[in-house]
Structures are given as structure tokens and as C-alpha cells.
Amino acid sequence: VQLQASGGGLVQPGGSLRLSCVASGSDFDYYAIGWFRQAPGKEREMVSCISSSHSTGYADSVKGRFTISRDDARNTVYLQMNSLKPEDTAVYYCAARLPYAITSVYTRERQYDYWGQGTQVTVSS
């Protein structure tokens, strides 16, 4: 599967963005998907993840502000980001893997097999 992330940009603190991760290939609905981000000088970290059965997981830093969802008919996973903060500034990546179970979510970078190219999110006034 090939992944294409988009939707990043410059937004003021408190603003919103919606990122999209579009996948090519078949059987997209079988894949577990994760969103990660990497800020300058920092390690890549998990932001949110969703299973093929739509179970979700979030990093503590984004709970209540970010929402992950998927539209399997469009081969797309979304990350709705609200109440953005300057510390959310990073390059955001989506990743995919085939899961062991439809309810499985994966929170670690090394658990994913396929990666998109990243989209820059900058939160600044």
C-alpha cells in the first residue's frame, strides 16, 4: 500500500486543521493506520491510531483535541486537529500495517510497515 498525507499548513494557536491520509492499493479496510509526528530535534512520536474495526488510540498530549477517523470507501484516514498549540508544530506522517486482529491498534513506530511522505503543520501567531 502507498500512502499520501496532506492537509498541513500554517495555523494560529487555537485554530484547526484536518489532515488526510489517502491509500492506494486494495483491501485498505484491513489495515491499521497510525498518525505520527516529528518536531525539529525530537524523535518521532505517535499521535493517534485507528484499527480496521475503528477502535482508536491517542497520545495524552492530544486527547480531547484531535480526532482520528476513517472512510474505507475513500481509502482515507483523517486526523481532525482542533485547539492547536505551538507545540503541535511538526511534520505529520501516516503509517499502515496489516493487523493481527481487527481491533488491534499500534502505537509504536517500528510496528508499521508502510509510511507516507509527511505534511508540515506549523502553529504560530
Image (cartoon, grey):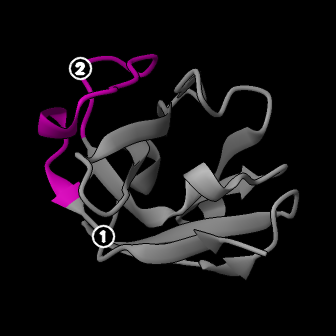
Q: Is residue 54 magenta?
A: no
Residue at the image position 11 percent from the left and 36 percent from the top: 110
Prevailing secondary structure class for the magenta stretch in the rendered image: loop
Identity, as a three-letter code, of the amino acid under mark 1: Gly
Q: Distance between the residues labelled 1 and 2?
A: 21 Å
Q: In this view, does 43 lie above or below 55?
A: below
Give how far across and how far down residue 73 sits, in percent. Answer: 63, 62
Residue at the image position 54 percent from the left and 62 percent from the top: 89
Q: Name the residue under label 2.
A: 100
In the picture, measured across the screen, residue 60 lies left or right of residue 43, that is: right
Q: Name the residue under label 1.
A: 116
Question: Which type of secondary structure does the marked residue at label 2 adopt?
Answer: loop
In the picture, measured across the screen, residue 22 lies left or right of residue 124, that is: left
Give the number of the disc on residue 33: none
Residue at the image position 49 percent from the left and 39 percent from the top: 47
Quadrant location, the C terminus? bottom right
Chain part drawn in magenta: 98-114
Give how far across and how far down residue 80 sits, in percent. Answer: 74, 54
Identity, as a three-letter code, of the amino acid under mark 2: Tyr
Q: Which of marks 1 and 2 is in front?
A: 1
Give how far across and how far down residue 23 sits, in percent. Answer: 41, 70
Residue at the image position 24 percent from the left and 57 percent from the top: 41
Question: Which type of secondary structure does the marked residue at label 1 adopt?
Answer: loop
Q: Is residue 104 magenta?
A: yes
